């Protein structure tokens, strides 16, 4: 990375260790660094405190330790309009969305970027485990070197302009190194627990949260041969392949084995389940996806062989993009895939390079 002395970099400070070390590394490299804390969700916990209060306090302490300014910006209205409305709409339609991907596209690398530029920044930096490689005037998004923490999946919707104006300093490090850097620097976040799940929900139960925005509509749980064996709380609570939380046990005439969601019948408000973890109905060899974003902004010639993930933390799967039609494509996998889930993202790779991705619409 070339040093750009006196260039202002705005770091998205979240109050976690990754963004803390991001700011520290950039300051050590000679950049003019400022922090910017995003308030994306205005909600409260049971005791009436805001979900982001502890994080902003940690962010302030980190910035004080690093002797850099900390700005704050309330993007909750943008988040509601550009991310959360889509999140609820998808669940109402029986799909399982991934709001973190859309948040990166619409909030962190768009609205946040625009705000940072208004503050005089030449670029923004975040604590994502990913890398950016420039070739001539083109920018590649690469996996983070720590493959256990790689977050390129969540960045699949970024474009050339967004990559050109972004930096991922910890993409060259593994998590252990990041925590060691923070500990040596005396940063309060060095041993802070990583956040998991959907960021705006916090530590509250997911069903309880979702029921505030979608009216529960109980219905039948059926086997594939139409036998009613239970009742669900609302099909939108469940996802394909799900085992936990079905409340099915001791079904007469059935073996004593776990049940798995294999289908959501939205029109009839039914949940269809099977007992075999590897039941054929849970496996597919292909899918259709839409809203495809190609990071290079060049559409590949088909058929195109590459790798893909149809969910985060999945190992790369060999596949072929068979057909591309405007912003949609059809994909076939070399091996059958379990529980491909409409609403989730399929993200394409060529070795370490993230090519882009789109929303899964249906499975074959």
Image (cartoon, rainbow, N blue to C red):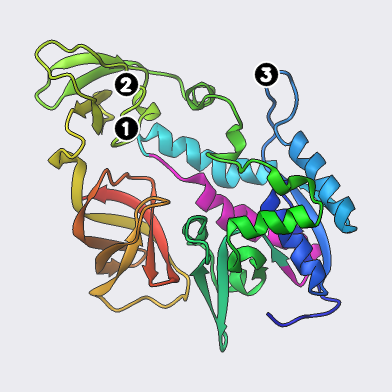
- Badge 3: residue crowd in 10 Å (few <14, some 14–19, many ≥20): few
Q: Which circle's residue, 3 or 1, is located before the other in the chain? A: 3
Answer with left or right where residue 243 lies relative to residue 135. left
The quarter of the rendered structure image containing the N terminus is bottom right
Answer with left or right where residue 100 lies relative to residue 358. right
The answer to whether one can see residue 132 in this image is: yes
Image height of 224 relative to 123, above or below: above
Q: Residue tagged by mark 1?
A: 242
Front in this rendered view, residue 54 or 157: 54
- Where's residue 176, x and y in %? 61, 56
Q: CA distance from mark 3 to mark 1?
A: 28 Å
Badge 3 element = loop
Q: Residue tagged by mark 3?
A: 46
Q: Is residue 99 magenta?
A: yes
Badge 1 element = loop
Answer with left or right where residue 69 lies relative to residue 212. right
Residue at position x 20%, y 14% in the image: 229
Badge 2 element = loop
Q: CA distance from mark 2 to mark 1?
A: 8 Å
The answer to whether one can see residue 292 in this image is: no
Residue 246, numbered circle: 2
Residue 104 found in image quarter: bottom right
Residue at position x 72%, y 48% in the image: 190
- Badge 1: residue crowd in 10 Å (few <14, some 14–19, many ≥20): some
Q: CA distance from mark 2 to mark 3?
A: 26 Å
- Where's residue 272, x and y in %? 21, 27
- Where's residue 101, x and y in %? 51, 52
The reply to whether callout 2 and callout 1 are in contact (CB within 8 Å) is yes
Give the magenta part as a residue range. 96-123
């Amino acid at each position: 990375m070339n040093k750009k002395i006196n260039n202002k970099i705005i770091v998205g400070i979240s109050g976690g260790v990754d963004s803390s070390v991001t700011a520290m590394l950039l300051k050590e490299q000679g950049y003019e660094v400022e922090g910017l804390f995003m308030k994306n969700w205005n909600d409260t916990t049971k005791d009436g405190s805001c979900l982001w209060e502890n994080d902003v306090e940690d962010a302030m302490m980190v910035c004080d330790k690093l002797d850099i300014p900390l700005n704050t910006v309330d993007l909750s209205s943008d988040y509601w309009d550009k991310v959360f409305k889509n999140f609820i709409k998808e669940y109402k339609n029986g799909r399982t969305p991934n709001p973190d991907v859309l948040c990166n596209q619409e909030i962190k690398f768009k609205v946040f970027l625009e705000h940072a530029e208004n503050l005089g920044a030449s670029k923004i930096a975040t604590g994502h485990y990913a890398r950016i490689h420039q070739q001539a005037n083109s920018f590649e998004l690469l996996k983070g070197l720590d493959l256990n923490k790689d977050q390129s999946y969540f960045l699949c919707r970024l474009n050339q302009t967004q990559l050109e104006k972004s930096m991922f300093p910890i993409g060259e490090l593994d998590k252990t190194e990041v925590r060691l850097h923070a500990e040596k620097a005396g940063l309060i976040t060095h041993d802070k627990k990583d956040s998991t799940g959907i960021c705006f929900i916090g530590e509250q139960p997911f069903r309880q949260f979702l029921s505030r925005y979608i009216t529960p509509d109980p219905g039948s749980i059926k086997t594939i041969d139409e036998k009613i064996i239970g009742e669900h709380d609302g099909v939108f609570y469940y996802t394909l392949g799900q085992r936990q939380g079905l409340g099915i046990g001791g079904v007469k005439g059935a073996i004593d084995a776990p049940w798995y969601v294999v289908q959501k019948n939205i029109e009839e408000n039914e949940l269809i389940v099977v007992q075999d973890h590897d039941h054929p109905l849970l496996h597919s060899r292909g899918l259709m996806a839409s809203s495809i974003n190609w990071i290079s902004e060049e559409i590949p010639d088909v058929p195109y062989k590459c790798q893909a993930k149809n969910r985060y933390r999945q190992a790369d799967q060999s596949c072929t993009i068979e057909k591309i039609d405007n912003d949609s494509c059809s994909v076939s996998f070399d091996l059958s895939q379990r529980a491909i889930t409409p609403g989730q993202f399929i993200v394409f790779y060529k070795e370490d390079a993230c090519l882009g991705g789109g929303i899964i619409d249906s499975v074959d």
